[in-house]
Amino acid sequence: MITRRKTRTITVGNVNIGSEHPVAVQSMAKTDTADVDATVNQINDLENAGCEIARVAVKHIEAAKAIGRIKERTNIPIVADIHFDHKLAVEAIGQGVDKIRINPGNITEKNGLDRVIQAAADKGVPVRIGVNSGSLPENPAGHDRVADAMVSLALRHAEIFRKKNFEDIIISLKASDVVTTVKAYRAIAAEVDFPLHLGVTAAGIPADGIVRSSVGIGALLLEGIGDTIRVSLTGDPVCEVETARRMLTAVGLRSFGPQVISCPTCGRCQVDLVGIVTELERELRGVRKEPLVIAVMGCEVNGPGEAKSADIGIAFGRGTGVIFQHGKAIKTVSADRAIEELLALIKDEG
């Protein structure tokens, strides 16, 4: 059981963020925010995949003004991502956005931050202080120095907010380097009780980004650090959501439906295990029974043991498989009927 770091609760739209609440899954629309139809469609696709908070890029005033229309046609909270121009944050707040993300390293206009704080306070909109290593005013070298600079910048800006009696703050400290990211989050976690949004920025295409994100975010989650997560991938944002949900399931913090475990196969396997598992996963999409562990094992070496320890399992031999339910063998079925038999048992569970 993971003991989560204690934080205050921050409310983003209809989602509560903090240690007393589930770690929330976040992603980001990759459309031009001013294109309302495209942005609405992508946010709704993200919601259908299980996203709980969606961020949009606000790069000009047209994008900021589109937020009100986007919110009319979407359900999950919307975060406005602001860089350089504080006036975009003020407009987004006026349009009813649910949270503002600012990068304090690149908002430099005099009194700009003060105006954002005042507008957010007036509307009760929380702010994420999102520090990226690439946006640091200086250019330090080395994991420790970069992490320290990120933490220092976040703390300085958090203090600016607190001096103005604004405490609805979430903090993120993202680097593309996993070690730097983990060091920064560990350090900030010891300094403040604000919720933390986790991510490894610019993690790359899925083949690389899933690994980097899983190592970095996963390490922190296992230490109890983190209250929202975003897996930043170059590609379809739905993949970000699916990866985040799998990550939270893997560390035992959330359960989103049946979990399939399966062996890697070897020369002992005498069935098309890859095909069977792939089809079973496809059939289970949308099934919300939880928690439920389904084991699909390719041979008799560790198959019966793993299958018996799951809620439902099957261990295959030559063209047949023994089905287990709660540790007991209940029937032997042919390989071509395995999925049908497993789905029937899953339907009866719970």
Image: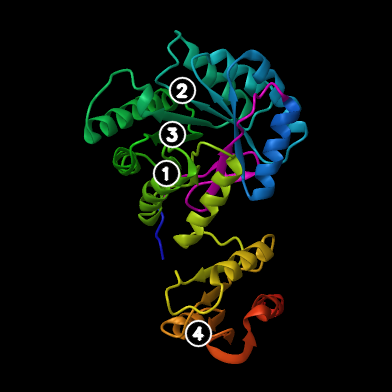
Residue 260 in the image: above or below residue 134: below
- Write down the residue under mark 3: 202
Q: Position of residue 245 (x, y in %)?
A: 54, 54
**Quarter containing the N terminus:** bottom left
Q: Quadrant of residue 260?
A: bottom right
Q: Position of residue 103 (x, y in %)?
A: 45, 24
**Quarter containing the C terminus:** bottom right
Disc 2, disc 1: CB below 8 Å?
Answer: no
Q: Which of 115 and 299 is in front in this view?
A: 299
Residue 95 in the image: above or below residue 275: above
Which residue is at 47% across, 27% downward? 165
- Write down the residue under mark 1: 208
Measure the C-alpha gap from mark 1 to mark 4. 34 Å
Nearer the N terminus, badge 4 or badge 2?
A: 2
Element type where label 1 sits in the image: helix
Q: Can residue 5 be seen in this view?
A: no
Measure the C-alpha gap from mark 4 to mark 2. 58 Å
Measure the C-alpha gap from mark 3 to mark 2. 33 Å
Q: Residues within 10 Å of mark 3 (few under 14, many from 20)?
A: some
Measure the C-alpha gap from mark 2 to mark 1. 41 Å
Element type where label 4 sits in the image: helix
